[in-house]
Image (cartoon, grey):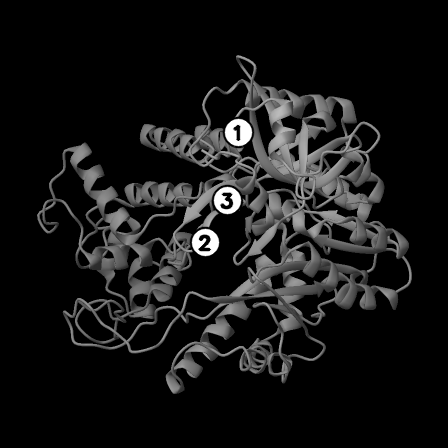
Amino acid sequence: MVRVYKHKIGINFMNYREETLKNALADIKSGKKTIRQAAECYKIPKSTLHDKIKKKKTKKHGGQTKLSSEEEKMIADGIIKFCEWGFPMTRGDIRLLVKGYLYGQGKKIKIFKDNFPGPEWFYKFLQRQNILTERFAQNIKRYRANISKEIITEYFQNLEESLDGVEPTHIVNYDETNLTHDPGRQKVLCRRGSKRVERIMDVSKSSTSVMMAITAAGHLQPPYVVYKAVHLYPTWIEDGPEGAMYNRTKSGWFDAMTFEDWFDKIILPYFRNLLGKKVLIGDNLESHISLHVLEACEQHSINFVLLPPNGTHLLQPLDVAFFAPMKKAWREILREWKNKNRGCIPKSDFPRLFNKCIKNIENIENNIKSGFRGCGIIPLDPNVVLSKIPDVDASQEQDQRQNEKHWTTTLQEFLKESRLAATQDLRPKRGKKLKIAPGKSIGRKDLEAPSTSCADHINSDLEKNSEREDETESNDDDLELEDVTDGDEKENCGQEDLETDADLVSNVIQGTFVLVKFNCPKNAHKYYVGCVSEIVDEAKNVYYVNFLRKQQSEKTGVHFVYPNTKDQSLVEGPQIFQIIKDVKFLRRERFQFPSLRKYDVRIE
């Protein structure tokens, strides 16, 4: 079947165009010409004009659609409704939807095998419903879809105050991303019917982290590259983008130290040359917020604005308009390099390829400006973002006005439940949360002064400690030490390894490894090894401690590691039993404490 058919004048029937027919009918209806006169003038059969005027034989020539125009319109509206709620349909889904609809109506269409439309019907359906088109869908997590219009509205209300009187050149948006070493799949030509097509190309799951920053005026700031390595070498920073900076971490991701270095090397030099109020917009990652950065922002009149959680796909200009073309250009360069070379990209080649990637991005300035415009920042327009979020109440009223079928209302309720229904939160619990309204700038005072009193915060965490103390059995990976008396402890533990002075807590500083004692039922005690991460109240001897977990291997024996889920708790001074001084650092952030074995401390 020909998908695109163009009628040729002078062949078989209908030797005239649709516009000619419309003009002839208009002359007849207006009384300018009779049917005979119009037929002679426009070269259209008189019978055709007569049937059109009398509204006879109104069907189109050729095969008729199996579904009426009203039914197809109803299906198209349902498809759009699916897409608005975040569940777009594929070709197969639409064909199955039609099959279910036909069975529900009790209809049997012969040319559809088992009432299942073929691929050609789908293509013709798209042509008739020109409001529909096929696009690649971007996956977003369910909690991102839960962002509400109230959150967006509050963010823009605060953002309006932060951006008051700020020029576009003074507004900077930053975000980090990673460039993978896998170019991804690509369509190729092969024998028809082939089930598995392979292409010889070395790929890797490794990636390189990059921090990008753009201004609302359309300017791209120098990138900041972070390698996954312990050391940095000269060949890793040659031939890169102009002004780019390079660093390394063990994980390959940005941490608080690398973020501060990026801020000092990239952002501050740019803002120092500008007069007046400046705005820095970014996500609310914990590693991006530090006392050093906030103090520098206050000194240089920089408003540090945080985006709402789970809303960067709508409110981050880099995510909206820049990262997609950049990664598309990177995949093309990566594919070209791997066709000529074997193995993974050496770090010495990455700066040159990344520089080529930046240069290959088309219309960088227009893309950046479109990102700020698409996020409603420049010009400030909340409706640009609010229009992308489905409005439950408005859609229900619209459905009632249009008197849609019952299945559309049922479909909408299903979509509402699928998108907004509460699901079990499987994410690990986090530490302290900064209670800063999205869109408002924050400063050092906000970081030092929590919204609740320190006493309330301490009491809350101390209640959690009580729950820890009430546990009668510990997990297999918890550290449990033998219950001993104070005399036994002093007898078994030497002064050279474990601190036992009366002023024990006075020697506790940030980064100190300590042995913490928790009371258990039946006058028993349990001991845990941890590291002091923060001194909350030095006068009251209250600390934040990150606890470790015990592991054992054939090569290193018993050692301690930080768990994947951060185990942090508030600890008071009397709970610190000893300060551990003999710490042996192993590879991969593993630790050993020889004194725990030397002094007959039993670990279960």
Tag 3 residue: 564
Q: Is 424 displayed left or right of 375 in the figure?
A: left
Question: Mark 1, residues whose alpha carbon is within 10 Å: few (<14), some, or many (≥20)?
Answer: few
Are the residues flagged by discs 2 and 3 in contact, CB closer than 8 Å?
Answer: no
Q: Is 284 displayed left or right of 70 in the figure?
A: right
Look at the numbered disc 2 and give the secondary structure of its residue.
Answer: loop
Question: Mark 2, residues whose alpha carbon is within 10 Å: few (<14), some, or many (≥20)?
Answer: few
Which label was assigned to residue 556?
2
Q: Earlier in the sequence, mark 1 or mark 2?
A: 1
Q: Rounded to the nearest whole Å, what is the CA distance between mark 3 and mark 1?
A: 42 Å
Tag 1 residue: 393
Q: Nearer the viewer, residue 199 or 155?
A: 199
Residue at x-position 35% and y-position 33%: 411
Specify the quadrant that holds the N terminus. Answer: bottom left
Q: Rounded to the nearest whole Å, what is the CA distance between mark 1 and mark 2?
A: 62 Å
Q: Is 193 placed above or below 281 here?
A: below
Look at the numbered disc 1 and give the secondary structure of its residue.
Answer: helix
Q: Earlier in the sequence, mark 2 or mark 3?
A: 2
